[in-house]
């Protein structure tokens, strides 16, 4: 079936089989392999992408269900060679090791901090409980998120002004 | 863990959906947050999925004088963020923090949760506790079932083949109602090892009336605890009364044993959580 | 002008991060080849059984299915996977590359389906008709060790090996003891659970008879040799290519049956074969670990001096002995004494097979288990002696004056039974930990009921053998742009290898780190290499890099000198430029065309020993059994810190993994040998809300004398002492109930049960 969506600002038309998940479609048909698949049953969160502004598990979504949606994947986080404040904070605070869960973590945090730039540490932790990481013990991830939060607050303020 | 093959439909009207649901072994796709995982494990292999996402109006939250009406496609995040709902049925809003995780709450739906009928899930327990009425539509017409009758076993409902949940109706609450929701799971977002949803009203002499206690996780389906309710109805909530109710609750649950918890442990948790919920509700 | 570099010791941000943060990492699952076939494995649905028949006809007829392989398709005898550390008795227990005749664990590969898509391959799994006559399963230690159910008719026993750790006169020590304490403890079966499942892409080039395997990790060179031997190919006909790897932790990258079968299919059908393990099969197929029990005794004099340790360890190694399946067993025997001075030791470590997934290593193999056992015994010993548990430990910690300190040699061995702790004063981290943790201030909470929760403190000390031998290699080449390519034999498994080796290389060459290009983990770069296991990559790989750098600079000097018509001794090298006294100079890039290169190597069988102490403050909810970790402080001494940022990350991550071991992770089987844990909702690794309070301090008080860096392996230390510290704290918290945890994990149900049992015991007295 024909499915159209906008991914990272680019309009794409794909032809996924009915049973293809959005995760597989992004990876195989759109060739965006930054979205990782860690469990295929909706627990690990590695495949998290942002659909119409909201973080979702792309392994628990059919590609067909994304028809008409606007999607952001890890590849769309920074539009040029520069890293965003969120990415820089992860680099500085060693918020990643093997990098496999990282795209899902970043997508979750980007959605959260865009919607809730004043999210508390507790809120951030709670939201991240849906993203499994085996390397870091999460502590540097939280530190990275807290550091990046200021940039989202600035953005929110300048959007209001 | 690829999904088994199926036909995908996304009808734009309920009538069309009902017609499509006549296909043998067709299933409704709401948020997909429970259905897709069980398909990934090939524990379910529907011939067709009928996606409700294009049918207008199924994601509405309506609060009338007497009742709250939730469309089946209302998502957890819609419930979380709905201010009127927090006032009209605070028990529901509070329970949301226990429902799965952020990303799941962005897609998971109330209708899907009821149809999936996980005995450890929060919303079915709330529906049973709060006397929800479930509106169904199918090829043979419409009907309404009480939430208490909807669940017949683990992952099993009384829904007939082809029937679709069209609305969930919950009675509105009086302002002064006492309530609490307590749940224990090993990690954030895991299914409950046990959980208690309860409310009651106080009469003029501060005695509990109209006590409703529902349990999840420690039974094969969400259910009320009539023994514990009886121990509380007409009583002022003293430590002694609470202890009696907890003992009754422990006696009347018949928890399953699985790798996450033994029957004995879950039974004890029911008592512990009920005690904590009653203390919270009464303070 | 540049002075001497100081990348070593600086928190250099990782070079890997840029690509990972942009979704530009390339993992094996991201690789695609034209015309590739997808593999799916038919796995045994029972724990133990005789294969009567495998009917593949319906699967072969399935649209899109290309082929099905079973044992019948392997010509001659079914090859077995060789051991990394062979010993005289384990031969018959090696794992065949596919089940034939018998299945011995739930999930054992019995057939491979090859299809045009992963979906179709998986669809066709249901079409394979397996006729397996189920046999009684050997699951628990009693059944296995009594040989009631025997897995292998030859040699007819489930005991694969017994390791002996022997030191001093243990009977005399016990005869002289004033106080002895004995305990039976157990740790549960676990797995490493890297976030990326395994995956392989194998390509066969029929023109050159060459096999290329993508998805290498941990041990590409050893696995290449194994593959070549099993396929009957020369080593030069096989290459292992490492792409980005989503975590290792000891389990990923060992040679598994799937490795052979995927490559075999690629050769047989002349097709690229791709297999990405799914999470459910991952739980049954990748190495398990940690299922160990002990019955051990300690002997003390009345002043608390440790005199001896004796007893038995029992390790369930699963259905076969895998390449490194014996490592945890021998390690448990050798390292159980931990950081303590124990003059007399006799431990017997029994490795027995069972109808469970074959075991291998998981971060801190044998060390975590042994540490839990002895740390529990130390607390029990302190109680028996009427001594403070801190004072008892401090008295017995090995000191600087005793270095090198010999651990108990272990036999049978592959020639290296003996080992010495290399350097350190184990009291240093102990004292520092108590200070950082604030033990004296927190002591008032110990054993107290506060707001409905019982608070407890616990302590545990550890050593971490690391930097495993035998060797590592590195090659350096000056490139046309004046940068230096560094080819390392070590593997990157997500630990930041590229950064750490670049730091070492840049310092050794005295050039900017931007000029280092690091390549690693693939057999195409070097003739030989070892890899990343046993916390070795930084120390062994780094030392090889230093050797290569020294040689490269010499070669550069010679080349520059010839260009300037000077003697090399007349040149000094600063920042990649050779300078003569007369002001003339030659930079790196000017000699690139002369192919300046150097091979470096570091050989050392002696491990390094990092060491440390951890302390924990926790609170137990008696109603639910839930344990809340309020503070966890770990102090370790790693000899020399190469990168404090990545080291801190390793320690923190290891501690939190340890909490998974201590509180929640468990692979549960039923009596028939069915694994009951099938999803990540069943296998409970820590999540972000669980353990926010971990405080790690790393010291470099005593550099290792056995490598040029002075560094010690440090990837595993964080996990080793978690079980002991936590269990001791739970005992301390629940002292009113007389609780003494002996079985792990301390999940809420078990803690609740301990309280109930304690209450019952109190009521009956």
Image: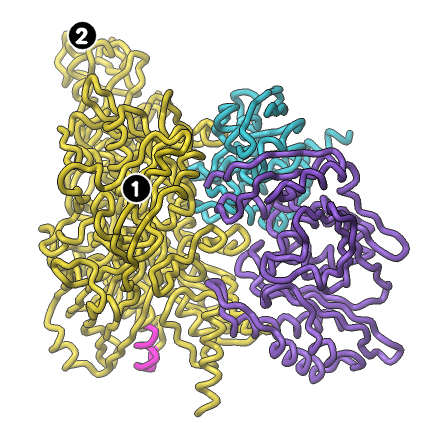
Instruction: Tell me which chain the residue with mark 1 is part of.
Output: C
Residue C684 is one of the magenta-drawn residues: no
What colour has chain C? yellow
Q: Nearer the viewer, residue C311 or C670?
A: C670
Residue span colored magenta: C378-387
Q: Mark 1 or mark 2, which has the lower sequence index?
A: 1
According to the image, label 1 marks what residue? C111
Farthest-out residue, bottom: C765
Instruction: Tell me which chain the residue with mark 2 is part of.
Output: C
Q: Which chain is purple?
A: B
Where is residue C1 shown, x and y percent of the image? 35, 20
Q: Secondary structure at mark 1?
A: strand
User: How many numbered markers are drawn?
Assistant: 2
Query: Which quadrant: the C terminus of chain C?
Result: bottom left
Q: Is residue B97 above or below residue A146?
A: below
Q: Secondary structure at mark 2?
A: helix
Q: Which chain is cyan?
A: A
Where is residue C725 shown, x and y percent of the image? 39, 65
Q: How is colour applied across the structure in the image? A: by chain
In the image, taking residue C94 as reference, residue C500 lies left or right, namely: right
Residue C385 is one of the magenta-drawn residues: yes
Residue shown at 81% from the left, 73% from the top: B210
Residue A42 visible in the current orientation: no
According to the image, label 2 marks what residue? C563
């Amino acid at each position: 079936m024909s499915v159209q969506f906008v991914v990272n600002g680019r309009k794409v038309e794909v032809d996924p089989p009915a049973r293809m998940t959005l995760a597989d479609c992004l990876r195989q048909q759109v060739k965006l392999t930054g979205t990782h698949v860690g469990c295929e049953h909706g627990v690990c969160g590695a495949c998290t992408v942002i659909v119409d502004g909201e973080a979702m598990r792309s392994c628990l979504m059919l590609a067909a269900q994304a028809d008409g949606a606007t999607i952001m994947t890890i590849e769309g986080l920074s539009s040029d060679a520069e890293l965003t404040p969120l990415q820089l904070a992860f680099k500085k605070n060693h918020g990643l090791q093997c990098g496999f869960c990282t795209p899902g973590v970043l997508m979750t945090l980007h959605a959260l901090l865009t919607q809730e730039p004043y999210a508390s540490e507790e809120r951030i932790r709670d939201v991240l409980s849906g993203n499994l990481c085996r390397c870091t013990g999460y502590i540097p991830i939280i530190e990275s998120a807290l550091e990046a939060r200021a940039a989202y607050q600035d953005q929110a303020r300048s959007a209001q002004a | 863990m690829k999904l088994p093959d199926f036909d995908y439909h996304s009808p734009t009207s309920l009538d069309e959906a009902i017609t499509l649901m006549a296909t043998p072994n067709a299933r409704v796709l709401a948020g997909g947050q429970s259905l897709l995982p069980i398909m990934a494990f090939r524990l379910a292999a529907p011939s067709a999925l009928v996606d409700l996402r294009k049918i207008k109006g199924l994601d509405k939250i309506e609060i009338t004088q007497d009742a709250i009406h939730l469309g089946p496609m209302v998502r957890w995040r819609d419930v979380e963020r709905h201010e009127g709902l927090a006032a009209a049925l605070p028990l529901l809003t509070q329970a949301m923090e226990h429902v799965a995780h952020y990303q799941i709450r962005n897609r998971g739906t109330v209708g899907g949760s009821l149809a999936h009928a996980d005995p450890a899930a929060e919303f079915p327990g709330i529906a049973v506790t709060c006397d929800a009425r479930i509106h169904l539509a199918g090829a043979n017409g419409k009907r309404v079932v009480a939430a208490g009758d909807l669940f017949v076993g683990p992952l099993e409902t009384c829904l007939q083949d082809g029937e679709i949940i069209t609305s969930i109706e919950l009675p509105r609450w009086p302002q002064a109602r006492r309530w609490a929701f307590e749940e224990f799971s090993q990690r954030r977002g895991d299914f409950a090892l046990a959980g208690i949803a309860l409310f009651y009203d106080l009469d003029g002499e501060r005695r509990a009336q109209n006590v409703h206690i529902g349990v999840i996780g420690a039974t094969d389906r969400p259910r009320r605890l009539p023994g514990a309710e009886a121990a509380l109805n007409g009583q002022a909530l003293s430590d002694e009364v609470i202890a009696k109710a907890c003992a009754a609750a422990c006696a009347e649950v018949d928890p399953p044993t699985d790798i996450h918890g033994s029957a004995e442990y879950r039974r004890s948790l029911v008592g512990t959580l009920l005690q904590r919920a009653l203390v919270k509700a009464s303070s | 002008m540049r002075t001497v570099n100081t990348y070593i010791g600086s928190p250099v941000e990782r070079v890997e991060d840029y690509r990972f943060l942009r979704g530009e990492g390339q993992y094996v699952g991201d690789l695609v080849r034209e015309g590739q076939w997808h593999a799916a494995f038919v796995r045994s649905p029972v724990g133990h059984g005789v294969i009567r028949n495998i009917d593949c006809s319906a699967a072969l007829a399935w649209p899109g299915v290309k082929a099905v392989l079973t044992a019948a398709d392997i010509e001659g005898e079914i090859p077995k996977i060789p051991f990394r550390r062979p010993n005289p008795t384990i031969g018959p227990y090696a794992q065949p590359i596919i089940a034939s005749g018998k299945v011995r664990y739930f999930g054992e590969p019995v057939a491979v389906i090859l299809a045009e898509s992963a979906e179709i391959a998986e669809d066709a799994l249901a079409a394979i008709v397996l006729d397996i006559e189920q046999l009684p399963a050997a699951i628990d230690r009693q059944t296995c060790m009594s040989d009631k159910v025997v897995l292998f008719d030859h040699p007819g026993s489930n005991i694969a090996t017994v390791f002996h750790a022997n030191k001093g006169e243990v009977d005399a020590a016990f005869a002289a003891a004033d106080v002895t304490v004995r305990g039976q403890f157990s740790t549960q079966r676990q797995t490493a659970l890297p976030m990326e499942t395994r995956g392989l892409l194998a390509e066969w080039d029929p023109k050159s008879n060459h096999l290329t395997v993508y998805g290498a990790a941990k041990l590409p060179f050893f696995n290449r040799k194994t593959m070549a031997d099993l396929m009957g190919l020369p080593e030069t006909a096989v290459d292992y290519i490492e792409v980005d790897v989503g975590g290792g932790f000891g389990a990923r990258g060992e040679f598994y049956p799937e490795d052979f079968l995927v490559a075999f299919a690629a050769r047989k059908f002349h097709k690229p074969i791709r297999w990405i393990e799914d999470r459910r099969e991952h739980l049954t197929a990748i190495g398990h670990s940690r299922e160990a029990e002990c019955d051990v005794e300690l002997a003390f004099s009345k002043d608390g001096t440790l005199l001896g340790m004796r007893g038995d360890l029992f390790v369930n190694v699963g259905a076969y002995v895998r390449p490194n399946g014996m490592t945890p067993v021998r390690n448990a025997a050798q390292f159980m004494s931990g950081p303590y001075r124990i003059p007399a030791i006799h431990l017997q470590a029994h490795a027995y097979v069972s109808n469970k997934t074959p075991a291998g290593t998981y971060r801190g193999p044998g060390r975590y288990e042994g540490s839990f056992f002895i740390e529990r015994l130390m607390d029990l010993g302190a109680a028996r002696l009427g001594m403070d548990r801190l004072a008892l430990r401090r008295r017995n910690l090995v000191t600087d004056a005793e270095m090198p300190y010999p651990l108990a040699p272990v036999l049978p061995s592959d020639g290296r039974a003996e080992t010495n702790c290399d350097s350190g004063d184990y009291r240093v981290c102990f004292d520092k930990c108590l200070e950082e943790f604030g033990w004296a201030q927190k002591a008032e909470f110990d054993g107290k009921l506060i707001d409905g929760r019982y608070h407890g403190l616990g302590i545990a000390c550890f050593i971490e053998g690391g930097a495993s031998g035998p060797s590592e290699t590195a090659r350096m080449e000056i490139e046309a742009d004046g940068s230096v390519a560094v080819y390392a034999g070590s593997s990157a498994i997500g630990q930041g290898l590229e950064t750490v080796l670049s730091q070492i290389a840049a310092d050794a060459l005295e050039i900017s780190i931007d000029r280092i290009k690091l390549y690693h983990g693939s057999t195409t770069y070097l003739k030989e290499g070892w890899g990343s296991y046993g916390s070795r990559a930084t120390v062994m790989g780094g030392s090889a890099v230093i050797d290569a750098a020294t040689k490269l600079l010499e070669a550069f000097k010679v080349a520059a000198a010839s260009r300037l018509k000077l003697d090399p001794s007349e040149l000094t090298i600063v920042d990649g430029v050779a300078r003569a006294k007369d002001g003339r100079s030659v930079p790196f890039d000017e000699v690139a065309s002369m192919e300046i290169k150097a091979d470096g190597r570091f050989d050392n069988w002696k491990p390094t020993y990092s060491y440390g102490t951890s302390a924990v403050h926790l609170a137990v909810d008696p109603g639910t059994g839930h344990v809340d970790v309020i503070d966890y402080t770990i102090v370790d001494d790693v000899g020399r810190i190469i990168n404090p940022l990545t080291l801190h990350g390793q320690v923190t991550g290891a501690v939190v993994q340890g909490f998974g071991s201590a509180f929640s992770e468990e692979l549960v089987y039923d009596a028939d040998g069915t694994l009951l844990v099938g999803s990540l909702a069943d296998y409970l690794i820590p999540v972000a809300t669980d353990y926010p309070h971990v405080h790690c301090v790393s010291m470099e008080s005593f550099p290792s004398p056995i490598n040029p860096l002075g560094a010690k392996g440090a990837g595993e230390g964080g996990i080793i002492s978690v079980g002991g510290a936590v269990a001791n704290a739970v005992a301390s918290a629940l002292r009113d109930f007389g609780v003494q945890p002996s079985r792990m994990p301390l999940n809420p149900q078990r803690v609740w049960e301990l309280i109930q049992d304690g209450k019952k015991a109190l009521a009956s007295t």
